[in-house]
Amino acid sequence: MGSTSKPLYLHVPEPGCRPGDKPDFSDFEMPRAGETRRPESDTSPEDMRDLAFSIVRVLNAEGKAVGPWAGTLSIEKLQLGLRHMMTLRAFDERMMMAQRQGKTSFYLQCLGEEAVACAFRQAMQPGDMHFPTYRQAGLLIAGGYPLESMMNQIYSNANDPIKGRQLPTMYSSKEFGFFTISGNLGTQFVQAVGWSMASAISGDTKIAAAWIGDGSTSESDFHAAMVFASTYQVPVILNVVNNQWAISTFQGMARGNSATFASRGHGFGIPSIRVDGNDYLAVHAVAMWAAERARLGFGPTMIEHVTYRAGGHTSSDDPSSYRAEGEGSAWPLGDPIERLKNHLISLGEWSESRHAQVTAELMDEVKHAQKSAEAVGTMTSGKSSSSRDIFEGVYETMPAHLIAQRQEAGY
Amino acid sequence: MTQRTMIEAIQNAHDVAMERDDKVVVFGEDVGFFGGVFRCTAGLQAKYGKNRCFDTPINELGIVGTAVGMAAYGIKPIVEIQFADYVYPAYDQIVSEAARIRHRSGGDFTCPLVIRMPAGGGIFGGQTHSQSPEALFTHVAGLKTVVPSNPQDAKGLLLAAIEDPDPVVILEPKRLYNGPFDGHHEKPIVPWKKHPLGEVDDGYYITEIGKAATAREGSDVTILAYGTMVYVAIAAAEEAGIDAEVIDLRSLVPLDTDAIKASVEKTGRCVIVHEATRTSGFGAELMSVVQELCFYFLEAPIIRVTGWDTPYPHAQEWDYFPGPARVIENLHKVMGA
């Protein structure tokens, strides 16, 4: 054997296609809608390991809701959900444009992933806390947070709730159950576990949802969160949003040789389930199931939301230099808004003309909020956040050395 | 008053805080059942239950990261990092998260947590049980960093840290856990149990964060020190026959610049002593402060006596540790200038 040994080589994974290639998702295993079973929420983790290798899908190609996960939402709630997703898309469109117009330095859109946060938010209760990444603005919109406040933050104007201190879209709202976004990837994942531990320590009934992207599951924070969630059987929902791309890094770089992100949960004994992230009904049903598990004391659940980042990473990114042209339209799970729209149409509860009308109505709503926010100021005009605010809030009480520095700075 | 070691004083501070406020929780590696490798949390799990004092997986990132989430929820975590040398995996959670959550969220969320860690050398701990990483915390906006030098302050500073609305890092000089150590490693120490500074107030009190103490009054030269170096400085002054004033800083951020200024204006000379490596060490900050505030009162250049800019050695510990001989040499230098 020794005499025949060959030189070793390093395996560096590559995505199936790159610019110039024809988009190809033939390797993507997609179960039929309704096919994946729905175990009772008290099922032991070892008896539902199959859920980490399937994908819960409710909406079929004809727009019908089928299978054991269907039926968690009323028509009114579905229509509301559609409006939330459409609002988020209109919001993104206007804010991307505002960034191009120079009204802010940066923007980060959720295009194609609207169902994940919007549907999930509807499964949570008041008092629950989300520890989001920067691509869960749908949690705020579906939670009823004012669009104008989001825009004030994006413009860093005088009414910015976080006083110009953070990059656009790094919102914070304790009142709306939305933890302050870090921008350092992954750090919030383990914090959500700690928040839920505190709820359990306090004998409270609230739960937390942790959020992380596929790429950031490589961070140590992800693994620390899994260890702690597993050890203390923490009432937390561990969401991995697999949108296939972390800037130019394809999901295989973080996933490595494991079959799915969800299957990472198995080594920790954490029940793990994959869901069609572009299927509003499926995301909601799985979120309800995981939340029930947490609230009943069955511990953590990991959810892999399988979706696709239809836009660039941020306003500073051009994905055409690393992704194959047309990959987004070839994505097998389609567009979340189109799919919910078609479902409601198939039920006779929506129509193309109503859709066009609501699209216009929501765009007006967004423009109205934008007008109000811009009347206060943008990053380049009007009233901006004060430079005095650099020094405020570093500590609850400003120490002497900061008072001196603030005076030195002229404030 | 009860005669306590620094370990007992720290344990007592936890006990007092947990008794007063049921939101206080304590956790870390070996902290629960065993009561900590140094025994600083002994008996707390038995008294307050596993929900308030518990063991964690060996994962410093996880310990501090979960504590950040708990503080955001509204309970008060005190975490123990078993040795300061092990804190680095948690550094991002301390620097980018705990320290900035109040500021970055516009005060929407806050992060009042306490991170305790035994630090410093003098125990033949080698490079992974001897470091003094205080400058890595003092450099971070949003953190407070304190270093007690006796049992009374160790308890008072911990109780103050628990009540503080912002994150506080406490570096506990482990060489002082059982008694004051002046660097004369060849001599036995007087244990706190038999030392006047081992007298600790019972019950609740705080030692204000941001206030230095005068450990020895003097008129010839000011020695700025903290932790173990307070006793090295006192020994050096007395052996050299130089009437040095030793300022025990206690709190590095916020820094008691008034106390520093008053002393250096009085003496006109300043020596700074710390165990940590020299380059970009906290002594550099102290030297800047003294120069900025007291330049026209200075009669000699400021001198630093520090650990060398090398990893902390094992067998050669006493050639690394800034003991009395090196301080004396530099006291003579600053007096002769």
Image (cartoon, grey):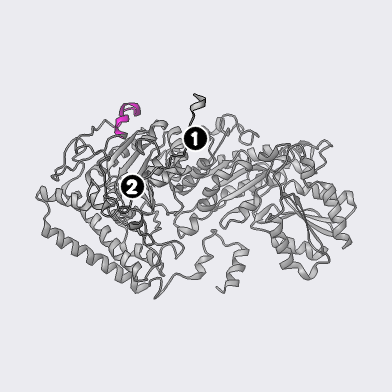
Q: Is residue A110 left or right of residue A254?
A: left
B158 vs A184, left or right, is right
Circle 1 marks a residue in which chain? A
Q: Tell me the residue at 80%/68% (across/down).
A: B297
Quick check: B54 above or below B99? above
The location of residue B332, given as percent across then percent down, is 88, 56
Q: Residue at x 27, y 35 (%)?
A: A54
Picture disc at residue A244: 2
The amino acid sitting under disc 1 is Pro
Q: Give the class, few, some or many, for how many residues have Cα within 10 Å of label 1's Cα (few <14, many ≥20).
A: few
Q: Is residue B45 above or below residue B261?
A: above
Determine whether the residue tagged by mark 1 lies in a helix, strand or loop.
loop
Extreme residue in the bottom direction:
A382
> Local crowd at mark 2 within 10 Å, few (<14), some, or many (≥20)?
many
| Quadrant (top left, top right, bottom left, bottom right) of the C terminus of chain A | bottom right
| Pair 1/2: label in front | 1
* Picture quadrant of residue A378: bottom left
Identify the disc placed on residue A50.
none
State left or right for residue B99 relative to residue A246.
right
Residue A44 forms part of the magenta stretch: yes
Q: Residue furthest top?
A: A1
Q: Chain of mark 2?
A: A
Magenta span: predominant SS is helix
Q: For this rendering, which residue is in front, A75 or A27? A: A27
Q: Are marks 1 and 2 on the same chain?
A: yes
Coordinates of residue B321 in the picture (x, y in percent): 77, 45
Quadrant housing residue B9: top right
Residue identified by numbered label 1: A7
Looking at this view, is A399 or B97 the one in front? B97
* Residue B89: image location, x then y, percent: 55, 43
Q: Which residues are magenta?
A: A41-51
Question: What is the CA distance from the residue labelled 1 to the residue labelled 2?
Answer: 33 Å
